[in-house]
């Protein structure tokens, strides 16, 4: 295609390819050091119960503070790590860090807090990861009901049978499983009745595409679907009051987004948990 395109487009394409290759090299060469030298850290974004208007849990989101390139967002390195065997080590690091935060800091303040972790469906193919997650849970003495595993449809579809096996194994151990970015995977809905799933996260594209004050049929359909399956739903990416209002009218039960709280450091989250509502 580049051959037929104009000179500018060709250069742009080369530029793009070059930076993609550089990203790949930078990520794969640096990820081991990132894990062992504490360049990775987690931020926590609160999730709200819309009935009580209180924080009911949060999502752990990984960040990489690279010694040379500075802060790298997960969207730039996770897909690359996912295609390598390092995804296992990264996922176990996230699990360990989250469990420590829960046991040492969050649960003493709020015993019901539900912490969500993102786990790539690709990592679910590994038996070592399957068992490693449960070992950390036991070792860190975190009650499984305080943890939730978020998995995107798209990464699961690469090997659905194996994913189902791992999810079942985790669910038997008491862990809860949520489907992340629900509605963006172009996949059949049949897996919803065969996989052990405890909830759906409504992708933020459906929330943000919604016009102010209008009703969104896709969001409403996903909320109805989770209701009839008897599972939870969490609306992601709530940025405005009118989106929140529309979600309330549609009887959404949980929401997350910049309006309610940005991803933040653990001590900021603890501060927010400690704030008592007045009036
Ligand atoms: P996700 O799991 O769907 O996480 C939600 C993303 O939306 C986060 O981006 C969050 O910061 C952002 N977000 C939250 N509220 C709003 C909002 O109101 N507006 C907008 N525009 N964005 C909002 P982030 O932290 O950059 O993470 C991007 C993706 O990277 C995540 O999407 C997840 O798929 C992946 N990721 C993050 N941490 C991990 C991890 O520890 N392991 C794995 N495997 N993937 C991770
Ligand atoms: Mg997520
Ligand atoms: Mg999501
Ligand atoms: Mg996402």
Image (cartoon, grey):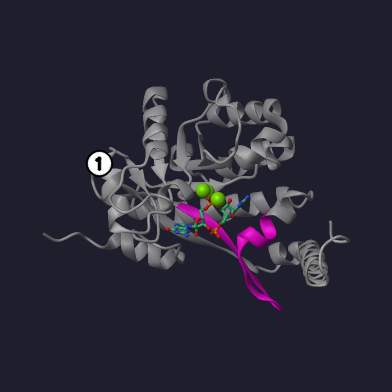
Q: Is residue 36 above or below residue 46?
A: below
Residue at image x 33%, y 59%? 240
Q: Which residue is mark 1?
A: 249
Number of numbered markers: 1
Can residue 242 be seen in the rendering of this structure? yes
Extent of the magenta region: 59-78
Instruction: Look at the image and tell me whether residue 50 can be seen.
Output: no
Split into 4 quadrants, where in the image is the C terminus? bottom left
Q: State yes or no: residue 194 in magenta.
A: no
From the viewer's perspective, tell me whether residue 260 is left or right of residue 124: left
Q: Under 8 Å from ligand 1: the CB of mark 1?
A: no
Closer to us: 81 or 37: 81
Looking at the image, which residue is at 27% across and 50% down? 213
Picture coordinates of residue 1 (x, y %)? 84, 56
Instruction: Specify few, some or many for label 1: CA neighbours under 10 Å numbering under 14, 14-19, or 20 or more.
Output: few
Q: Is residue 199 above or below residue 262?
A: above
Image quadrant of residue 106?
A: bottom left
Q: Which residue appears farthest toward the left when viewing the image?
A: 279
Residue 97's place in the image compared with 146, above or below, is: below
In magenta segment, residue 77: yes
Tell me the SS state at disc 1.
helix
Point out residue 172 in the picture as x, y percentages from the top left corner. Answer: 54, 26
Decide if residue 86 is on the left or right side of residue 52: right
Measuring from the top left, give residue 9's x and y in whole percent: 78, 67
Q: Position of residue 124 (x, y in %)?
A: 68, 37
Q: Residue at left 32%, top 42%?
A: 215
Viewed as shown, does residue 168 lie left or right of 219?
A: right
- Give left or right: position of 249 versus 198: left
167, 6: nearer the viewer:
6
Q: Residue at x 30, y 47 (%)?
A: 214
Q: Residue furthest bottom?
A: 68
């Amino acid at each position: 295609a580049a051959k037929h395109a104009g000179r500018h487009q060709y250069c742009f394409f080369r530029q793009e390819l070059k930076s993609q290759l550089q990203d790949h090299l930078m990520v794969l060469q640096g990820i081991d050091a990132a894990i062992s030298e504490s360049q990775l850290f987690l931020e926590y974004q609160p999730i709200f119960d819309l009935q009580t208007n209180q924080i009911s849990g949060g999502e752990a989101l990984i960040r990489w503070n690279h010694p040379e390139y500075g802060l790298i967002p997960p969207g730039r390195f996770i897909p690359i790590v996912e295609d390598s065997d390092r995804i296992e080590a990264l996922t176990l690091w996230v699990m360990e860090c989250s469990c420590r935060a829960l046991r040492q800091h969050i649960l003493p303040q709020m015993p019901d807090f539900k912490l969500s972790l993102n786990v790539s469906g690709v990592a679910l193919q590994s038996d070592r990861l399957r068992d490693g997650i449960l070992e950390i849970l036991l070792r860190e003495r975190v009650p499984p009901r305080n943890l939730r595993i978020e998995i995107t449809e798209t990464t699961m579809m690469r090997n659905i049978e194996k994913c189902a096996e791992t999810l079942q194994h985790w669910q038997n151990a008491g862990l809860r499983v949520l489907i992340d970015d629900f509605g963006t995977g172009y996949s059949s809905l049949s897996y919803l009745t065969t996989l052990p799933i405890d909830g759906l996260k409504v992708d933020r594209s459906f929330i943000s595409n919604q016009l102010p004050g209008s009703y969104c049929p896709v969001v409403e359909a996903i909320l109805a679907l989770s209701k009839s399956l008897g599972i939870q739903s969490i609306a992601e990416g709530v940025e405005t009051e009118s989106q929140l209002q529309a979600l309330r009218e549609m009887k959404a039960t949980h929401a997350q987004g910049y309006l309610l709280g940005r991803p933040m450091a653990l001590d900021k989250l603890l501060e927010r948990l400690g704030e008592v509502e007045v009036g």
